[in-house]
Amino acid sequence: MFNLIIFGPPGSGKGTQSVKVAEKYQLKHISTGDILRSEVSQETELGLKVKHIMTTGELVPDELLFQILLNVLETNTDVKGFIFDGFPRTLAQAKELDKQLEARNSGITKVLSLDVPDDEVVDRLLKRAEIQGRKDDNRETIGNRLNVYKTQTTPLLDFYKNQEKLNKIHGVGGIEDIFNSICEVVD
Ligand code: ADP
């Protein structure tokens, strides 16, 4: 299997680029944010548990993400690989991901990290707020999501750097230019 992880602060374009990468390399795109939002809108048991946490921009507990991960792996057994978008977000999630992939004789192939400055992501998210109306795209929650990303998720970059899997991508510019930089790394 060929498994990628894409990191980046909220508003860095992870979702947009993941869709393009998944299509080009025929990978299954897994966005834990999308999975969670769908649980919330369907008012499932899981959705009801995470609704409030998500509106504040805090992280959903690892145990719930472990359940989602198992479900993803069990329901996608004949894919070429995955692109994980928004997951892992904590060291515990990264370790669990390694463990579950190893148990399936697989692993993470490469890790991409989109670099976008804070003022740029805030601008992008405020614009998205007007268009899409995502509940967590408001000034207060955006600040918290950036903070949560910096404190809880960026330490993971060192985890993958130590495994020599980390590739930083300049995330400012046109969507196609950024996509080309990603393809150079993936190829
Ligand atoms: P963004 O990167 O724009 O903040 P996402 O769509 O990836 O947004 O995630 C939205 C929210 O869903 C997060 O703020 C968090 O509450 C929750 N979430 C998504 N993925 C995870 C994860 N791997 N671990 C914990 N919480 C998560």
Image: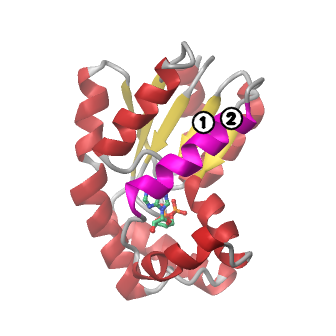
User: Is the residue 165 above or below the residue 43 in the image?
Assistant: above
Residue type marked 1: Ile
Q: Is residue 141 left or right of residue 16?
A: left
User: Is the residue 125 above or below the residue 35 in the image?
Assistant: below
The residue under the point 67% across, 68% down is 39
Residue type marked 2: Glu
Secondary structure mostly taken by the magenta-highlighted segment of the chain? helix
Q: Which residue is mark 2?
A: 74
Across and down, in percent, residue 163 comes to: 29, 20
Q: What's the CA distance linking mark 1 and mark 2? A: 16 Å
Tell me where the magenta segment starts and ends, as one range: 61-76
Kindly report which numbered mark, 1 or 2, lies closer to the viewer in this rendering.
Answer: 2
Across and down, in percent, residue 77 comes to: 73, 26
Secondary structure, mark 2, is helix
Can the viewer see residue 124?
Answer: yes
The residue under the point 54% across, 55% down is 13
Mark 1 and ligand 1: say if the CB distance to the nearest ligand atom is below 8 Å: no
User: Is the residue 117 above or below the residue 19 in the image?
Assistant: below
User: Is the residue 182 above or below the residue 152 in the image?
Assistant: above
